[in-house]
């Protein structure tokens, strides 16, 4: 397989021109039966198959190890941040495609990392290839719509705002157009980390994940292109519950586990995009030794938490110790989402056994 930026590229079949039609239908509501214009706009399956072509696309799942370095400055700074909104087709799992919407072609969108008191100039651009309006709402912003009111743009347009990071914590950002539930479900969310003035405790590794639901016209695992299902979203009945946009992306069946060394202290940021389900965040074979509930980085953290609720529109942070080798499975403990809908990732701890802590063969 060919690679871009170290990521495998997958080849799959996609009906030519289907992407924009699906996105539009998803946002504005499914056409009613008997609507002649809607029927005419939807090709028959045979026509879709005849027009299908082979397309190579990068993966949609963001690399959990790609996040900015910790704050190492002690005076306010000014940051220039540029984000592009995109609409693209990619795989939920091998052989199953979907029309995603993203910030910077990844799910979750890139983490923005600043210090309390810093100023951010944000420039948001909508790709000329898009078919829908987009914007951005930062939960870390005092201002109308968290900035959404002043960043609503059409395809090919740009907007710029400036804000001061007044309060510390780790917060969601997301698209907030009127059909925001669809846009967030399709991938338009990320995190902004506003570190306290004194920074965060030092750790050996940091990881960044995002959970969200996909509502599609197909069943989980059904091969082919899945369109967005507005009615399923209204019922809050997702086909998939994903980690970073794909089913089982960071397992042996996907891109492989994320590896850390035994003894590493690891901080994990978990962005719950939703748009509807609360995550029961749990690490199988470990515990949230230090847990920053609801992204609160200044109150005393909780300790030794087994499973924690992370509501839609929230970023939680946790620190774990890794005293023994083996897999740590990141799950939503609403376990049907793990067994049947894709919500599983693995951190593989590498190193020599520690039988005094865990002995599999006493």
Image (cartoon, rainbow, N blue to C red):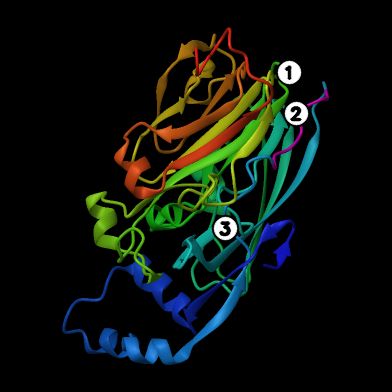
Earlier sequence position, callout 2 versus callout 1: 2
Q: Name the mark on residue 60.
A: 3
Residues at marks 2 and 1 touching, judged by CB atoms closer than 8 Å? yes
Magenta residue span: 66-73
* Total numbered circles: 3
Q: Would you place residue 23 above or below residue 200 in this image?
A: below
Q: Would you place residue 64 above or below residue 49 in this image?
A: above
Residue 185 makes an appearance in the image: yes
Q: Residue visible at 49% across and 69% down?
A: 132
Disc 2 from disc 3: Cα separation:
25 Å
Position of 225 with respect to 165 (left or right) is: left
Residues at marks 2 and 3 touching, judged by CB atoms closer than 8 Å? no
Position of 291 with respect to 352 (left or right) is: left
Residue 143: percent from the left, percent from the top? 55, 39
Residue 160 on the magenta segment: no
Quadrant housing residue 103: bottom right
Earlier sequence position, callout 3 versus callout 1: 3
Helix or strand or loop: what does disc 2 sit on? loop
Count neighbours of disc 2 (C-alpha within 10 A) and say few if under 14, some if 14 to 19, many if 20 or more.
some
Residues at marks 3 and 1 touching, judged by CB atoms closer than 8 Å? no
| Main secondary structure type of the part rendered in magenta | loop
Disc 3 from disc 1: Cα separation:
30 Å
Residue 9: percent from the left, percent from the top? 64, 65
Q: Residue visible at 64% across and 24% down?
A: 266
Q: Would you place residue 225 above or below residue 109 in this image?
A: below
| Nearest to the observer: residue 280 or residue 252 | 252
Count neighbours of disc 1 (C-alpha within 10 A) and say few if under 14, some if 14 to 19, many if 20 or more.
few
Residue hosting label 2: 70
Residue hosting label 1: 202
Residue 243: percent from the left, percent from the top? 49, 45
Helix or strand or loop: what does disc 3 sit on? loop
């Amino acid at each position: 397989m060919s690679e871009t930026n170290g990521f495998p590229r997958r080849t799959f079949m996609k009906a030519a021109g289907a992407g924009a039609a699906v996105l539009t239908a998803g946002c504005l509501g499914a056409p009613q039966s008997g609507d002649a214009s809607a029927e005419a706009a939807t090709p028959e399956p045979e026509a879709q198959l005849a027009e299908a072509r082979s397309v190579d696309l990068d993966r949609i799942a963001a690399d959990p190890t790609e996040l900015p370095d910790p704050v190492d400055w002690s005076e306010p700074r000014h940051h220039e941040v540029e984000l592009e909104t995109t609409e693209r087709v990619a795989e939920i799992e091998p052989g199953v495609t979907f029309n995603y919407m993203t910030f910077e072609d990844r799910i979750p969108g890139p983490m923005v990392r600043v210090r309390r008191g810093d100023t951010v100039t944000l420039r948001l651009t909508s790709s000329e290839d898009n078919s829908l309006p987009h914007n951005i709402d930062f939960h870390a912003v005092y201002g109308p719509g968290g900035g959404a009111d002043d960043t609503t743009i059409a395809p090919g347009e740009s907007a710029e705002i400036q804000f001061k990071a007044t309060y510390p914590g780790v917060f969601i950002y997301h698209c907030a157009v009127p059909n925001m539930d669809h846009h967030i479900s399709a991938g338009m969310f990320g995190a902004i980390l506003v570190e306290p003035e004194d920074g965060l405790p030092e750790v050996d590794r940091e990881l960044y994940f995002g959970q969200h639901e996909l509502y599609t016209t197909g069943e989980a695992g059904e091969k082919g292109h899945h369109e967005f299902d507005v009615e399923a979203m209204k019922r809050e009945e997702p086909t998939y519950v994903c980690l970073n946009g794909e089913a089982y992306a960071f397992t042996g069946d996907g891109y492989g586990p994320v590896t850390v060394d035994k003894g590493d202290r690891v901080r994990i940021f978990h962005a719950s995009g939703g748009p509807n389900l609360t995550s029961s965040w749990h690490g199988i074979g470990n515990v949230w030794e230090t847990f920053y509930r609801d992204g609160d980085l200044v109150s005393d953290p909780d300790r030794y938490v087994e499973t924690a609720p992370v509501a839609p529109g929230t970023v939680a942070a946790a620190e774990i110790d890794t005293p023994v080798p083996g897999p740590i499975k990141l799950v939503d403990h609403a376990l049907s989402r793990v067994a049947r809908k894709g919500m599983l990732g693995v951190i593989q701890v590498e190193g020599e056994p520690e039988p005094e802590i865990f002995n599999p063969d006493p």
